[in-house]
Amino acid sequence: MLSYIIKRLIYMVFTIAFISVVSFIVIQLPPGDYLTTMISQMEAQGDVVSAELEAALRVRYGLDQPMHKQYFTWVTRILTRLDFGYSFAYNQPVRNLLGDRLLMTMAVSASAMLFAWIVAFPIGIISAVKQYSLFDYFSTFLGFLGMATPSFLLALVLLWVCYQVFGTNASGLFSQEFINAPWSMARVGDMLSRIWLPMIVGGFQSAAGLIRTLRANMLDELRKPYVTTAKAKGLANAFLIIKYPVRIAINPFLSSVAWMFPQLISGMSITGIVLNLPTLGPLLLNSLQNQDMYLAGSVVLILSVLTVTGTLVSDLLLAWVDPRIRYQ
Amino acid sequence: MERQMIEDNFELEFEADPNDAIYNASHWKLMWMRFRKHKLAMIGVVIVIFMYTLALFAEFIAPNDPNFTSSQYSYRPPQRIRIIDSEKNWHWPFVYGLKQARDPVTLRLNYVEDTSVRVPISLFVRGSEYTAWGRVEGNLHLFGTKDGPWFPLGTDRLGRCILSRIIYGARISTTIGLVGVLLSFVFGLILGGISGFYGGAVDIVVQRITEFLSSMPQIPLWMALSAALPANLPPLQMYFGITIILSLFAWTGLARVVRGKFLSLRQEDFVMAATLSGTSNAKIIRRHLIPTFTSHIIAQITLSIPAMIIGETSLSFIGVGLRPPTISWGVLLREAQNLRTISQAPWLLIPGLFIIATVLAFNFMGDGLRDAADPYSQ
């Protein structure tokens, strides 16, 4: 097991290093840089930007250096001081912008995951046990719908429904008075009263996939002879199902959770933008449009690290549960 | 006992009957026979054909010019098609005209049906001029009205007909999946094929690349890459740019399937026979291996189209994908971006129904194809 973990960790380090290069290159792809955006904005306001001033600014922002040098400075600072560079547009260190949003992204993704689990678990089992019942058809339909609806569309529709029914705007993670308030019990309470919308939007698609997997696994198990044996011995049906087939059917369920969490984090970017959440998604979009390169690069890097770590953790979990993987 | 023997005998004869359709059917015919039994898949096929028909004949089917703007038609609600008028008389299908009225409570200007104006709907009407496929000029529309405007699904902020825009948008939104899948198919087939057929070091390298790509967060990178496309790119180049970005990640899934198939087929006797009789590797791949798993590939391709459609609409919706004046379903939904607009004009969300229907249809079709891909299994 130890050698497996070490092997995976080494892979992970290489992957992340490679991702950091790729994300830096991608961020640099658009023609021009933040300075050209800034200068064109200043010129639109009527300011005249001389060539000297431009050169001076370029030196100040470190944009006069060749790309590979910029990259190495950026990476060394991240590794040595956890300094992600400076956001030109927000005029403050990238790290200050990331902290809270990273936490929020994790919180919202984790709650969406929880939602998907809680919904998928009973529905998947019941629709397998009562195959071809009305409930089964309904949940199958729901599952198909969940996979076919883009998250942003679901978010829009739910926002609209909320507005029609309750007359309130349910977007955002905090009410008006708590947006900039320091953390307190009241603020946490406010967040909990609003988190259900991103939770549903983010978790719906995953729940749909999980229901399908769980149902299929359960159906396979229910047909096996040991179930018949247990029934013949007179075990109560509910007890029997929970005790044996569910425990086996849940195994691949764990593995699908593995690839789900990274997908959730990645998908949360768009949900975050539509629902105006204080997560990394809107920050990324903003920085991409402004060519705020260190901010954009850092967000892509952090999201990648989250994805890779998520995959690793779930693989380890799976290896722990299933010895066949461990000893391969 | 005797009866059993007769039955056995009968079955034997049945199997040997050379005239029976099943035993003479080709691989593709068997697939079709099985596919036809999958009801949802057949519904999917109908919907997909419908959508592509819309896309192909957009100019003729759309009742209005999708780019015609008019401030006096801003945010008109959908007009209901009726056959019974307010005095309970039956008519040929018609719509009522709309007039503006102020809401007594909110004082907002609303449209209400004007029951004194009856606008009959007719088939094959002459309407706005168009040039179809860049060469055929015409003004004939499948349906429309002669006296008075009719917007079947309402209008947007600039007074443009939503239905017509959806129909034109089908052109972009339904083909982006096809073109993208075609691209990733080429990538996936080449890389997956090489990796599965040769194995060894080549296999390891390709495997690492696919693993690396699939470990990256897809949506943030889509966003970063499409934001990297210059905003002033001509529509056609933008379209291909987005397509390439979408297929950049999609090919890994296809490559995995192709590789798996190659790995298992490589062991088959017919490959050995071909190798022994001196056939070159390239020819074995082309003549023997590819035809064997074409049906699986088609199923896999169909199943990867929905992700592309959703990808395009999502990117266009948040403003880094296709941009106006290009019309796609994502661009249309961008009109419905904030709550105020949606609550004032909920019909702006209708393009979403077309997205869901198309994605569902492809999913059903893909499921059916996957089941039918191996017609010899039970």
Image: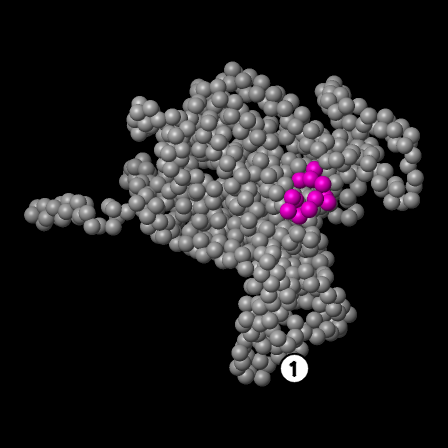
Q: Relative to residue B360, is residue A88 drawn left or right?
A: right
Picture quadrant where residue A22 is located: top right
Q: Is residue B103 magenta?
A: no
**Is A266 displayed left or right of B186 in the figure?**
right
The location of residue A159, given as percent across then percent down, is: 66, 53
Task: State the residue at coordinates (56%, 38%).
Answer: B247
Q: Nearer the viewer, residue B84 or B157?
A: B157
- Residue in the image at 77% along x and 70% along y: B107
Indicate left or right for B137 with B286 as reference.
right
> Residue B263: x and y, percent?
40, 27
Magenta stretch: give its range: B226-238
**Chain holding disc 1:** B
The percent coordinates of residue B88 (x first, y second) are: 55, 83
* Residue at numbered disc 1: B116
The residue under the point 80% across, 29% down is: A86
The answer to which of A219 and B337 lies nearer the viewer is B337
Q: Quadrant of residue B120?
A: bottom right
- Point out the image quarter for the C terminus of chain B: top left
The image's colouring method is: one colour
Assign a secondary structure to mark 1.
strand
Taking the magenta stretch, the answer to whether it contains residue B230 is: yes
Question: Residue B287 at what x, y percent from top left?
Answer: 37, 34
The disc labelled 1 sits on which kind of residue? Ser
Q: Residue at x 79, y 41 (%)?
A: A181
* Residue A18 image-quadrant placement: top right
Viewer-nearest residue: B360 or B136: B136
Judge whether A35 appears above or below A83 on screen.
Answer: below
Residue that extends furthest to the left in the rendered view of this protein = B2
Q: Is residue B171 visible?
A: yes
Q: Is residue A96 above or below residue A78?
A: below
Q: Nearer the viewer, residue A87 or B138?
A: B138
How packed mark 1 is, by other alpha carbons closer than 10 Å (few <14, some 14-19, many 20 or more), is few
